[in-house]
């Protein structure tokens, strides 16, 4: 997932695009859920049984999307957890704020504050962290989790995870800052009680990601890192008095996910947020146009087997590797991918057609107003939009496709879903409402 408003929204599957062909054959049955699957994780504003995790971006405040926006849009009523993107990883192998102003220094006005009160001059904790605290006070069942890394800030993981000392130092710094609330320059414990756990978003072990150091040692080092996180969080629970969450944001592509010891990591995490989006997109400049987050694979997809993806395929793969359905969250994007220079093709809709260039990546709240005709692919379970006049093709999610995904999650017995990111929804939260209703009714 991308970091910051200008960073590339790279694919969870991009690293797999040129990898070996997908595994084939019959997938093994998933094992029964372990006792840890039912660990008390609580619920947020919604009290249904499925997890609905929404990502809130640190930088959203610069474009007018703040924690209060989750309330005015109604999105908060469907969320069980809010993941905060992101903590940076410093060159010395410790957790570090990537933007301390947005995180805990920026004063909020009364109009933008969750509790309707302006931050006072000299107030100890301000910024997003204080607003998260206010949000938690208003919705006490909501879990709030700090996500670490992301696409732009994964460059230090391989080195820090390569030694036991490096892992211990890194995890201790993350727990100290985000669980114990000891932020640089602020009184001890100033941010205590805000975060209910940590999400690790290393993109990706034994893959270059955004030009990062990597190597085959990352496979076992990732497992060891997650074990260290679980051990230190368990120790911190003694003081917290409640279960502290640990999740991992991981690739949906079998070729990349194969570089993780999934069954071993599953014993440490509460669940995986499997990044089932960016299957195809504007980085594939010449196309063919295709879907970015389709639930099922359309048999007409012209891409070869090693470049054909679906949510269903990712779930099957994780289960085949020993991950219980109750430890799988699938991910959905609140944005689209576009291609330009797309001819109508034999069906007149631009689907599976060559392009001359990749296009924009609009948020969903921009897509309904774009010119073109909306189509529905029943096989894939996805909408798409094509404007013949400009030759622009857009793949995206809409309320109908998310309702289908909600039903799919329930049918497969999955843990739930993760959304990237909440600022992409409409002002009335239409995507989140459709998804939440389908998930939890």
Image (cartoon, rainbow, N blue to C red):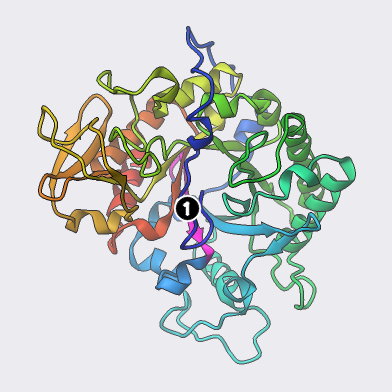
- Residue 53 within the segment the image draws in magenta: yes
Describe residue 51's horizontal placement relative to residue 236 as left or right. Answer: left
Q: Position of residue 329 (x, y in %)?
A: 50, 36
Describe residue 269's horizontal placement relative to residue 252 as left or right. Answer: right
Secondary structure under tag 1 reads loop
Residue 50 visible in the current orientation: yes
Q: Based on the displayed image, in which of its 4 quarters is residue 306 positioned?
A: top left
Residue at position x 26%, y 39% from top?
A: 355
Which is the main secondary structure of the residues drawn in magenta? Answer: strand
110 or 19: nearer the eye?
19
Tell me which segment is drawn in magenta. 48-58
Find disc 1 in the rendering and name its residue: 8
Q: Residue furthest bottom?
A: 121
Residue 141 visible in the current orientation: no
Q: Residues within 10 Å of mark 1 (few under 14, many from 20)?
A: some
Up/down of 296 relative to 392, above or below: above
Q: Position of residue 264 (x, y in %)?
A: 71, 26
Q: Position of residue 291 (x, y in %)?
A: 31, 35
Up/down of 240 relative to 37, above or below: below
Q: Residue furthest front?
A: 356
324 or 332: nearer the eye?
332
């Amino acid at each position: 997932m991308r970091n910051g408003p200008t960073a590339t929204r790279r694919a969870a599957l991009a690293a797999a695009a040129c990898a070996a062909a997908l595994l084939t054959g019959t997938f093994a049955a998933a094992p029964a859920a372990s006792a840890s699957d039912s660990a008390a994780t609580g619920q947020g504003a919604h009290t249904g049984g499925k997890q609905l995790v929404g990502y809130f971006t640190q930088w959203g405040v610069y474009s007018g999307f703040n924690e209060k926006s989750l309330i005015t849009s109604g999105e908060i009523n469907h969320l069980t957890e809010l993941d905060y993107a992101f903590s940076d990883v410093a060159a010395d192998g410790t957790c570090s704020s990537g933007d301390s102003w947005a995180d805990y220094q920026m004063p909020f006005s009364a109009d933008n504050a969750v509790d309707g009160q302006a931050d006072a001059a000299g107030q100890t904790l301000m910024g997003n962290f204080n607003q998260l605290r206010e949000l938690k006070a208003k919705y006490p069942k909501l879990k709030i989790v700090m996500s670490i890394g992301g696409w732009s800030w994964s460059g230090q993981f391989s080195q820090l995870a390569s030694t036991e000392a490096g892992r211990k130092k890194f995890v201790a710094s993350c727990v100290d800052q985000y669980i114990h609330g000891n932020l640089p320059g602020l009184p001890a414990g100033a941010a205590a009680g805000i975060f209910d756990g940590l999400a690790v978003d290393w993109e990706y072990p034994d893959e270059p990601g955004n030009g990062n150091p990597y190597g085959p040692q990352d496979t076992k080092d990732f497992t060891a890192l997650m074990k260290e996180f679980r051990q230190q969080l368990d120790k911190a629970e003694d003081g917290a008095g409640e279960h502290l969450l640990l999740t991992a944001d991981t690739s949906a592509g079998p070729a990349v996910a194969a570089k993780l010891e999934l069954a071993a990591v599953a014993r440490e995490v509460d669940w995986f947020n499997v990044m089932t989006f960016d299957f195809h997109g504007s980085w594939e400049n010449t196309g063919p146009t295709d879907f970015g987050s389709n639930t099922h694979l359309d048999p007409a997809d012209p891409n070869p087997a090693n470049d054909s993806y679906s949510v269903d395929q990712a779930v099957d793969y994780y289960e085949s590797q020993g991950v219980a359905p109750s430890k799988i969250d699938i991910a959905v994007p609140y944005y689209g991918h576009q291609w330009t220079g797309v001819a109508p093709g034999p069906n007149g809709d631009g689907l599976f057609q060559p392009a001359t260039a990749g296009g924009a990546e609009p948020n969903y709240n921009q897509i309904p107003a774009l010119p073109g005709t909306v189509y529905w692919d029943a096989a894939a379970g996805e909408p798409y939009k094509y404007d013949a006049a400009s030759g622009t093709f857009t793949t995206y999610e809409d309320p109908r496709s998310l309702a289908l995904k909600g039903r799919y999650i329930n049918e497969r017995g999955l843990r739930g879903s993760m959304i990237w990111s909440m600022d992409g929804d409409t002002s009335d939260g239409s995507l989140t409402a459709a998804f939440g209703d389908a998930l939890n009714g």
